[in-house]
């Protein structure tokens, strides 16, 4: 099974890149299953129901979120209804939505787990205990388990990778919008990458127009950070998974420019 894990989709340029690149990869058979982080899809902060439906129609099998999940209040009821859109599992109990979903495929059931980090982030519940409560808990969990760890600190992601090695098919990081080059198959057969990168405008400051961000750094005054528009790419990774074992057999970083 070939799985495409897509880094943070930022605004309209990111959505366009996703539709252009990921959709063609799926149609051509280059990938079988797509997980996309879309917590920045709505103007750079959050996700709306119409935009989630747009991404699902464009090829996403599961959409993950992160620390901007609650920026668009109208999505709250949708998260309770739509099982293919998940938010971090270690949000406080009682929050709308779910942190894990299992999707039937021709390659067997695929389980996707979404986590959010705590280092340099808000005081969320423990992601380690949250993931322990979800994976391997009965027949509803698929043999293939994919984890999106939405976190700031590389150390936290690395440790989570080692913690889950041999228990999941892959764990990849999102949130920093900068793709790392440390893809590896860990000793227990889990594919790992610290950060998938960003799907959106590369000529930017992690997706925002450079001038406004620079002004804030120079003056310390707040500015409105608009989504940039140039040099649009999709970044992520393709993970090969053995259907019979759920172990990863390969991982390769992806960077595809729109129209390239």
Image (cartoon, helix red, strand yellow):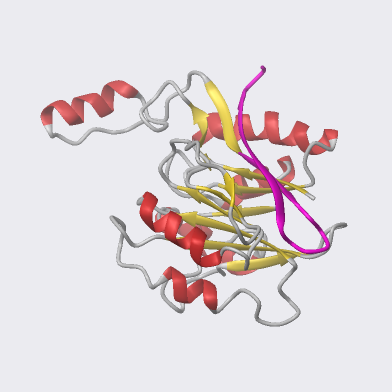
Depth check: 190 or 56 in front?
190
By secondary structure, the bulk of the magenta-drawn segment is best described as: strand
Task: Give residue 124's position: percent from left, percent from top.
Answer: 36, 68
Residue beneath the point at 49% across and 50% down: 173
Taking the spot 73% from the left edge, 44% from the top edge, the residue there is: 57
Q: Nearer the viewer, residue 227 or 240?
A: 240
The answer to which quarter of the image holds residue 251 is top right
Can see residue 88?
A: no
- Horizontal side, residue 26 vs residue 172: left or right: right
Q: Quadrant of the C terminus?
A: top right
Is residue 258 on the magenta stretch? yes
The image shows a total of numbered marks equal to: 0
Q: Residue at x 54, y 41 (%)?
A: 7
User: Of all residues shown, which one is farthest toward the right?
Assistant: 106
Q: Is residue 93 visible?
A: yes
Q: Indicate the position of residue 207 as horizontal and vertical percent values.
A: 42, 31
Going by the picture, which residue comes out furthest to the front? 187
Q: Residue furthest bottom?
A: 138
Query: Is 191 included in the stretch rendered in magenta?
Result: no
Give residue 78's position: percent from left, percent from top.
Answer: 59, 62
Name the one closer to the observer, 132 or 54. 132
Up/down of 194 relative to 228, above or below: below
Classify residue 84 by image quadrant.
bottom right
Q: Nearer the viewer, residue 77 or 66?
A: 66
Which image quadrant for residue 139? bottom right
Magenta highlight range: 237-260
Instruction: Name the residue at 46% across, 78% down.
Output: 94
Estimate the x, y position of residue 254 in percent, counting from the top left: 62, 33
């Amino acid at each position: 099974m070939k799985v495409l894990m897509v880094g943070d989709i930022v605004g309209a340029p990111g959505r366009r890149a996703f539709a252009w690149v990921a959709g063609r990869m799926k149609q051509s058979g280059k990938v079988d299953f797509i997980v996309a982080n879309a917590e920045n899809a709505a103007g750079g902060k959050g996700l709306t129901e119409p935009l989630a439906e747009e991404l699902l129609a464009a090829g996403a099998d599961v959409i993950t979120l992160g620390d901007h999940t609650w920026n668009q209040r109208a999505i709250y009821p949708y998260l309770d209804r739509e099982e293919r859109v998940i938010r971090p599992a270690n949000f406080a109990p009682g929050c709308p939505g779910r942190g894990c979903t299992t999707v039937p495929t021709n390659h067997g059931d695929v389980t996707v787990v979404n986590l959010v980090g705590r280092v340099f982030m808000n005081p969320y519940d423990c992601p380690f205990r949250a993931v322990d409560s979800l994976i391997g808990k009965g027949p509803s969990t698929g043999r293939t388990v994919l984890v999106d760890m939405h976190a700031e600190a590389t150390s936290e992601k690395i440790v989570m990778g080692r913690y889950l090695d041999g228990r999941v098919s892959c764990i990849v990081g999102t949130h920093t919008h900068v793709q790392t080059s440390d893809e590896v198959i860990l000793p227990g057969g889990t594919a790992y990458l610290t950060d998938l990168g960003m799907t959106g405008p590369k000529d930017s400051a992690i997706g925002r127009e450079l001038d406004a961000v620079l002004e804030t750094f120079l003056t310390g005054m707040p500015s409105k950070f608009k989504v940039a528009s140039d040099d649009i790419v999709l970044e992520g990774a393709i993970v090969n998974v053995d259907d019979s074992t759920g172990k990863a057999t390969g991982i390769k970083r992806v960077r595809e420019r729109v129209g390239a």
